[in-house]
Amino acid sequence: MDSTVKLYSENSEELCDFLEKFFSIKFKLNNKNYWEKRYLNPIEMADIVAVFVDNKDKYRNTNMWVSIDSGVFINIKEDNYNFFIQYLFERYPY
């Protein structure tokens, strides 16, 4: 089962800016207010989750949702991201 990160933004420039800085490449989004990435290894999601929350003050109009179980999405916020990352490493300790 793939794990998924979804980003939604009211501001397309803000979303593009975040992705370009995170991946260090130029981004061109088909849907300028939405981005999705699937991960085969859920642990790989930890980096983008941490960077997103660390920079949330710059990207106020952008929201992150993650899924590690089919059909269940968690809204990542400052008050739950540490628990989510800790859970990832406990659930997938490889």
Image (tube, rainbow, N blue to C red):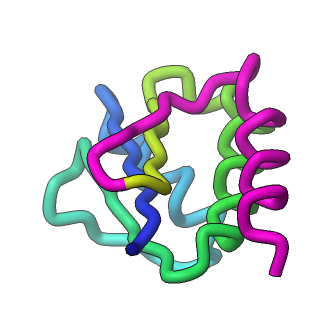
Above or below: residue 52 compared with residue 68: above
Residue 82 picture location, percent across and down: 83, 35
Is 39 a magenta residue? Answer: no
Q: Which residues are magenta?
A: 70-94
Residue 68 or 46: which is nearer the viewer? Answer: 68
Quadrant of residue 83 within the rendered picture: top right
Furthest residue in direction top, as rendered: 79
Residue 7 or 61: which is nearer the viewer? Answer: 7
Above or below: residue 23 compared with residue 22: below
Quadrant of residue 48 within the rendered picture: bottom right
Q: Is residue 90 left or right of residue 25?
A: right
Q: Residue at x 71, y 40 (%)?
A: 84
Is 76 a magenta residue? Answer: yes
Residue 6 picture location, percent across and down: 38, 50
Considering the image in quadrants, where does the N terminus appear?
Answer: bottom left
Residue 56 or 5: which is nearer the viewer? Answer: 5
Considering the image in quadrants, where does the C terminus appear?
Answer: bottom right
Residue 85 picture location, percent across and down: 77, 48
Quadrant of residue 88 within the rendered picture: bottom right
Q: Residue at x 33, y 38 (%)?
A: 8
Q: Residue at x 75, y 17 (%)?
A: 79
How many labels, in total? 0
Q: Is residue 53 left or right of residue 28?
A: right
Residue 35 or 85: which is nearer the viewer? Answer: 85
Q: Residue at x 48, y 33 (%)?
A: 74
